[in-house]
Amino acid sequence: MRIEIISDDRYILKTSSIDKSYKHLAREAWELSRSKDDETPLNRILSIDAPVNEIPSLVLNIECTIMEREIFASYRDHVMWARTSRVDNPLEFRTDPWFYTYMDEIDSLKKEIKKQAESGVIQDEYRMLIPLCAKTSFTTRVSWRGLIKIYKHFEYLATVDDYFRYTVLDMQTAFGLDEFKNNYSYVNPIPMLERSEQKSGKLGPIITVFQEMTIALRAQVVRHRNFTIKDNLFGIISEKDFWIKTLGDKIKISISAETEFWKTVINKRQCWIAQYGIWKDIIVEAQKYININEDNLPCAGGSSCPYTRDAELRHTDKDPGAPCPIHSKLHNMPIPKHKMDSVHIEASYRPAFWKKHIENVNIGE
């Protein structure tokens, strides 16, 4: 795990008429809740498993395996912005030298990705062959308290698989967490999903959707902090050779949220740019309990597209995705003729209302 600190607000600058000095934000918050003559040592404060240590935080860019990212994302108390799948060529995925024992399997996956790419399979499909040991990156804001919780969980996972020992070492080297961890409770962000919990339904304002989905979709679902999820990720980690499982391998997951939040998620995912194909099964299941239609699109009523830059790139060869018919009409951008096949493929697994928009689209050269 490579950790880059982008910003660090653990310390604040205190300015007075006499001098300037830096002060730890946890120390400041502690004193504001008590008195300025409180003499509790800073190290003692930082060892307290309480909200005072959620106030100091860091913004990090982390490069790690896909599996480590999934574990990190399973916590609900931080902000996470992952690297888009459109940035990196799936053919060029990288792995740590630690996984040399899987080189035959990794080479085989790369050959299959190349074969599918050359045969015209869309990127969203052939990227499903990327293994969980492949490197990825994400940006996150995480509190001091959150860091220690994550650190303690990776310590536990290191007893399951040796690779996680390096994750623990990297976090300790970056932040010196070991001396503070003992007073913090252990939180398991990936408890196993029980058989009795494997069902969909609605109870009061809460809708629960149970799915067996790809790990790639789980990677998107888990970043929505208003979702409560429970799955069998730990069961996967406990399996032999789990590192060469792929994004396309299946995981069982239960997703719960308040009805109004489900509506906001489904509205966005129906958008042409927002990977409806990957989310289709979840949307179909959730719509059993929610009425959603074309009027719920982000651009409904002829308003501007909130994803204009991404949509514009679809008109070029920089993005292999299909251009959006509604965006094309709204912004008077004819769809290149050679892109129309991909438009029809994309529409083939979308709601029927997209058909009329494709029929009215302007086609360019």
Image: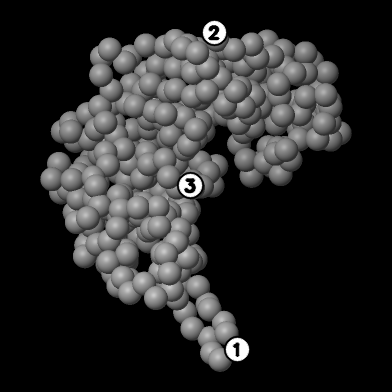
Q: Can you give x and y, in whole percent of width and height, for residue 3 in the image?
A: 37, 61
**Location of mark 3 (residue):** 80
User: Residue 220, percent across and down?
Assistant: 47, 34
Q: Is residue 93 visible?
A: no
- Identify the residue at image location x=32%, y=45%: 68
> Which residue occupies the foreground of this view, 110 or 172?
172
Above or below, 40 against 309 in this view is below
Pointer 3 local density, CA inside 10 Å: few below 14, some 14–19, many at least 20: many
Tell me, for residue 288, which label it has, or none. 2
Cα separation, mark 1 vs mark 2, equals 64 Å
For label 2, the SS is loop
Seen in the picture, residue 19 relative to 292 is either above or below; the reply is below
Disc 1 from disc 3: Cα separation: 39 Å
Q: Could you tell me which quadrant the C terminus lies in?
A: top right
Image spot of residue 298 (x, y percent): 72, 29
Question: Which residue type carries mark 3?
Answer: Met
Q: Residue furthest top?
A: 288
Q: Earlier in the sequence, mark 1 or mark 3?
A: 1
Identify the residue at horizontal 57%, vertical 82% (top origin): 15
- Residue picked out by circle 1: 17
On the image, the x and y values in percent for residue 270 come to: 63, 23
Q: Amino acid at mark 1?
A: Ser
